[in-house]
Every structure is written in structure tokens, then in C-alpha cells.
Amino acid sequence: MTLNELKDRIERKEARLAVIGLGYVGLPLACLFAEAGYDVLGVEQNQERLEKIAAGQMPFAGVEPGLPELLAKVISAKRLRPTDHYAELADRQVIFICVETPVDEQHAPHYLALRQALQSLGAVLQTGALVIVESTLAPGTMQGLVAPLLEEASRKALNRDFYLGYCPERVMPGRLLSNLRQLSRVVGGMNAETAETMAALYRQIVQAELDLTDCLTAELVKTIENTYRDVQIAFANEVALICSAVGGNVWRVRELVNKSPGRQMLLPGAGVGGHCLPKDPWLLAHSVRTLNLPLRLIPAARQVNDSMPVHVFELLKKALSRRGRQVEGSRVLILGYAYLEETDDARNSPSAALVALLRQSGAEVLIHDPFIAAYQGSVMEKVAGCEALVLMVKHRAYQALDLAALVGVMRQPILVDGRGAFQPEVVESAGFDYWGVGVPPPP
């Protein structure tokens, strides 16, 4: 099948699609294409997730407007069919790859899932098929790893027997469908004709601009846009440390700074988590590892953001010391374990880093998160007898807490606010000692 023939099938919605990896990226993508009228096959190796999707149930918790209803709809209509068998990809003309691409302890890409997907797909790849990678990659990976591995596994030639493109995702938990529909996309092809064919497909679900380019440019754009955000958050976090040290309030300072034209200081906080920001700067840096190009800003920003859970730990130590207590032997409740509010996504959670520090120091740690099954329950019951309460995630449920009631059941009234979720005077009027990121310590 030629690209022109495939493009024609796409526009008539006769092309059969597949999505490898039905997580936060792949599942909404598969649902939207199924809703648009395509026959979609979803490949997922996690059996618990697979069973839930097959039953039309969300495989992860959190607030995802419209996705639970859409999933149930396309499963019921048999427009989306989940499977764990790669052999079923043999009749698919377009295959999306949406697997995780983490980094290892040395900050190098760990492409095990990607390699496995490519090898399994290559064994059954149909001649004339289009493969689109959406997973975030270090610049140069499409040319240096994906293309040769797929050629080897399929025994087919790129741009003759199959076609390859890169269109990195731009989604965030809590806004999956709206991000897919409304955010522009960078559509990178191994050649211009491939990019044009990809754009014909993405126009079926994306209401925003599609920017056609090559794969390397698309790889650079994806890693740079997330690195930019990571660096900007690091700046906000360092400013928060300065404000606290000199007796200022970072939240008021930020508000006034952002009134100046062209300034948009981001929010400081207790750390950066998720699958993207702690990883993508290292993917960008990895692309120049052999080129003798010294990088200073990107690694420094990563160090600042990774240090914020340690800063929260130090705030807690000071708060306990002010009350004549030590971390060792103290009972501490952590509010929030996900990396982001209103989701159950705990990948690279700053809370996990804080919990590890506390337990290493001999604290008894309790955890609450309304979206993670293992940590659900009553905040009031968990906080009873605690010396301190540490807010790490700005879930809406926490902002509705009865603070005075919490003080009444705690052993020591200490609240450490890692996200600027509370007004200090409100917390103090309820009877708490308030310690927060970017604000002066209590008098």
C-alpha cells in the first residue's frame, strides 16, 4: 500500500488503527479515534488494566472529564477492542506506540518497553503500514533506534515497505481529552509525504493547528518544551527559598512580579513529579552526551526541583524542634501521594521522596490520598495523635478540611504547607503552627 492509498483509506475512515499501550496517553487517543469512526485495536500487557478497559471501566482514578463516558461508549459499540496479543496487529494499517520511556539512575533513557513493542510489532507488521510513536524520546532516537530496530524486526525497508513518524503527546492527567482535542501537535515524518499522511489522520480528532516537520525537530520540540517548564519551576522554587530566608512571602511576590509585562513566574512547591518533567530534561541532555557540550542550567534545575522534598523535610524538622520534638518517634500524616491534584498518578511523586526521608529518620508516617486506594479513608481518623500534618498535593478535598477540628485531635498542632494551599492567618487562627514553602517561619 502506498502513502496515497493509505491517506485515502484514512479520509474514508477505512484504515484500521491500533494503539500499543493504553495508559494516560494511549487510552484517550484510542477512544477519540474510535469515536471518530475508526476500528481501533488497543494492545495492553497489564492484565488488570486490560480487564477494566474491556469492561468499559476506567483503569485509573482521578477526575478525567468525559473520558469514563467515552470509554464506556466506544467499548459498548465495539469500536475499541483491547487485547494483549501482538499477533492481532497483522491487519492494522496504522499503529501508534504509547509506551513509557523512563530514565535510569544515571539519567540515561531506559527504552525496554519501546524496544519490546517495536520487536513484537515488527514480527507482524503489514506491508505499507504507518507506525507513529507518541512516547517522549531523546532527540535522535527515531533515526538511531526506532527505524533500524523496526527494519530489523520486520525485515522490511523504511519508506518502501513501511512508514514511520513521530507525533509526541501533549497531555496532562485531569485534562486528557481536552488536551488531545485542543492543543496543537508537532507532526514529524521520516519524509514529507509521511508527515502529510499523519496530518490527515490527526485532523480527525485534533481541532488545533498541526505543524508538519521532520522527526528530529519533533523530538527536540517535545523535550525542550518540558525542559523549559522544569527550568521555570526551578526558578520559582529558588525564589521561594530566597523569600523565606529573607522574610518575604513568595506568593505575594509572585503575584506582583507577574503584573510586569512579559513576566510569568510559575508556582513554587514541594517538588516536581509525573512521568514527564523529571525525565524529559535528561532525555534532551542525553542527545549531546558524546558531543563535548557542557550543560549547566538543565542539570542545575533538576537538582533544585529534586531538592524540594528535602526542603519540606527541613521545614518539618524545624517545626517539630520549635515544639521540643524530633523527627524520630514523631507521627506524621502526609496529605497527598499523587504528583498532581485530582489524579491517582503517583509516578515520581515528591511525596514518595519525603516519605522515604521521614522513615529513614525514624518517623511514623501515615499517608492519605483520596484518589489512591491504598491511602484512602478519613483524614480525621488518620491525623489523630499526630505531631504534624504535611500537605504535599493540593487536592480540592484538603482545602475543605475543618482545620480547627484537626487541631483538636492532634498531639501537636503543626501544619507544613508544601503547595501554598492555605492562607497562613487562616491556619494560625485555627490553632496551627503554620510552616510553608516560600514564607517566613512563624514568630
Image: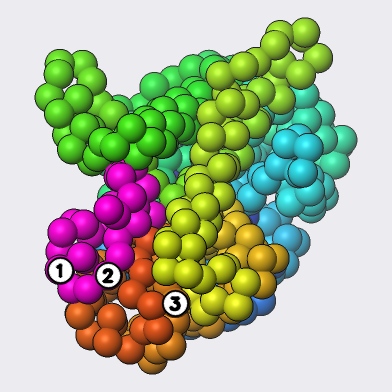
Placement of 163 over or under 388, stated as above or below: above
Tag 3: residue type? Glu
Placement of 177 over or under 53, stated as above or below: above
Spot occupied by residue 431 in the image (x, y as percentages of width and height): 22, 73
SS type, badge 3: loop
Spot occupied by residue 372 in the image (x, y as percentages of width and height): 47, 76
Crowd class of label 2 (few under 14; some 14 to 19; many from 20; radius 10 Å): many
Q: Which residue ends up furthest to the front in the rendered image? A: 324
Residue tagged by mark 2?
432
* 98 in magenta: no
Along the horizontal axis of the image, is 243 left or right of 373?
left
SS type, badge 1: helix
Q: Which mark is residue 387?
A: 3
Q: Earlier in the sequence, mark 3 or mark 1?
A: 3
Crowd class of label 3 (few under 14; some 14 to 19; many from 20; radius 10 Å): many
Q: CA distance from mark 3 to mark 2?
A: 11 Å
Q: Which residue ends up furthest to the bottom in the rendered image? A: 381
SS type, badge 2: loop
Crowd class of label 1 (few under 14; some 14 to 19; many from 20; radius 10 Å): few
Q: What color scheme is it?
A: rainbow
Residue, x 38% and y 31% (percent of image)? 242
Spot occupied by residue 427 in the image (x, y as percentages of width and height): 21, 66
Residue, x 74% and y 51% (percent of image)? 113
Q: CA distance from mark 3 to mark 1?
A: 18 Å
Residue tagged by mark 1?
429
